[in-house]
Each structure stands twice: as C-alpha cells, then as structure tokens.
Image: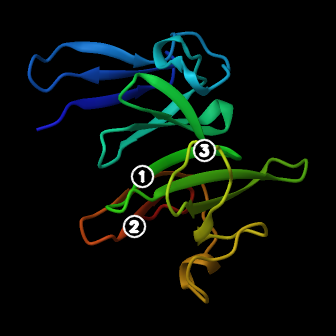
Amino acid sequence: MGSLFIAEPNYNRIRKVDAVTGLISTVAGTGFYGSSVVDGTRLATETNLYNPIGVAVDSNNNLYIADAGNNRVLKLGSNQKVSRVWNGNSVTGIALDSADRLYIIEQQQIGSTFTFNYRVLRTDGVTDTGTNSACLVAGTSSTHTACVANSAATQEALNGSNAIALDNAGNLYIADSGNHRV
C-alpha cells in the first residue's frame, strides 16, 4: 500500500500522508503562491507553486504536479528536486497511464473573450525539457494533431473539464463538469 498525496491549491503545496505512520508532511511548495525557476536543481519544498490542483505518480515513484496557476506540470524525483515537464495553457487535471504517458487537461482561452476551450492531450513519454510535444486525445484543438485519426473524442467540445482518470484497461474518464457528464 502506498502513501497518499494531496494537492492543496489554497495553500500552494503538496502534502503526503505516510501509509505506515499516518504522519502528514509537505513534499512540494512553500505555502506561498508564486513561480520559481524549476530546472532540476531546486528542492521541491523550496519551490513556489500557484494553485496546484492535481497529482499523479508514475511507475518509478516520481510525483507529477499540475501547477495550474503557473500553466505547467512539474516532476518531483527521488532526489527531492523538481523539474518542469510541461508548459502550456492552464492545466486543470493530470493522469498517467501504465506506460507512464502523461495525460493533461488544458483550458485554453479563445481570443480576448471569456470563452474557453478544454482539451485532453497525451505526451508519449515524459522528459525533463518542458517541451510541448503532445497529441490530442479528446476535445478540440487547432494546435495539436489527434493521437488517433478520425477519433470521435476529438470532435466533442469539452466544457469545464477538471479531472481525468485511467482504469487498468487504459480507458480514459473525463469529468466534463460544464456539460454535466463523464
């Protein structure tokens, strides 16, 4: 049984509940909102986060953090240092599949209006470069190619999507709250 990780967006930190002792500790964030340089040299507990809203753990026990207010996904390695693995639009959710491919829900503002486009992207392997190499899994996008050509999921508009999960068979579930559906 593993430990439980909790994103605390209002306190700008990630907490860990130890599975054996039940003790709670801070593993990332200073408790103050802001942005810090994340180049793999800074300790996670010395890194400012801004509205972290989700976490995921890969097969090597690396912790991924959806740092929504800073429009990025961070990776916390076993050395307790943090690096940036994704830069993009406002990240509203993350998940990892069994191959450690990162799935990201992005909220993209359209023009200067308060209209948003939500989409789910997939990276094919995570690097520590922060590059935006990804394909479109669900939602609509003018900047990303669909992972699967002619997929019905890339023809559906998402609205207010804020959580994703994958089951053991690799099925992706999207909480599409603005459309009142999963």
Amino acid type assigned to the residue bearing label 3 in the image: Val
The residue indicated by pointer 2 is: 172
Q: How many marks?
A: 3
Residue at the right extreme? 112
Quadrant (top left, top right, bottom left, bottom right) of the N terminus:
top left
Please give the label number shown on residue 91.
3
Residue pictured at 51% horizontal, 52% vertical: 126
Is there a contact, CB below 8 Å, between mark 1 and mark 2?
yes
Element at label 2: strand
Is there a contact, CB below 8 Å, between mark 1 and mark 3?
no
Residue 123 falls in which quadrant of the image? bottom right
Amino acid type assigned to the residue bearing label 1 in the image: Ala
| Residue 165, position as x, y percentages in the image | 37, 56
Q: Residues within 10 Å of mark 1 (few under 14, many from 20)?
A: many
Quadrant (top left, top right, bottom left, bottom right) of the C terminus:
bottom left
Is 145 placed above or below 165 here? below
Element at label 1: strand
Q: CA distance from mark 3 to mark 2?
A: 17 Å
Residue at the bottom extreme? 150
Q: CA distance from mark 1 to mark 3?
A: 12 Å
The residue indicated by pointer 1 is: 95
Q: CA distance from mark 1 to mark 2?
A: 9 Å
Is 118 placed above or below 20 here? below
Residue pictured at 59% horizontal, 16% vertical: 48
Amino acid type assigned to the residue bearing label 2 in the image: Leu
Q: Residues within 10 Å of mark 3 (few under 14, many from 20)?
A: many
Judging depth in this view, the residue of 117 and 126 nearest the camera is 126
Judging depth in this view, the residue of 2 and 12 nearest the camera is 2
| Residue 51, position as x, y percentages in the image | 57, 27
Q: Residues within 10 Å of mark 2 (few under 14, many from 20)?
A: some
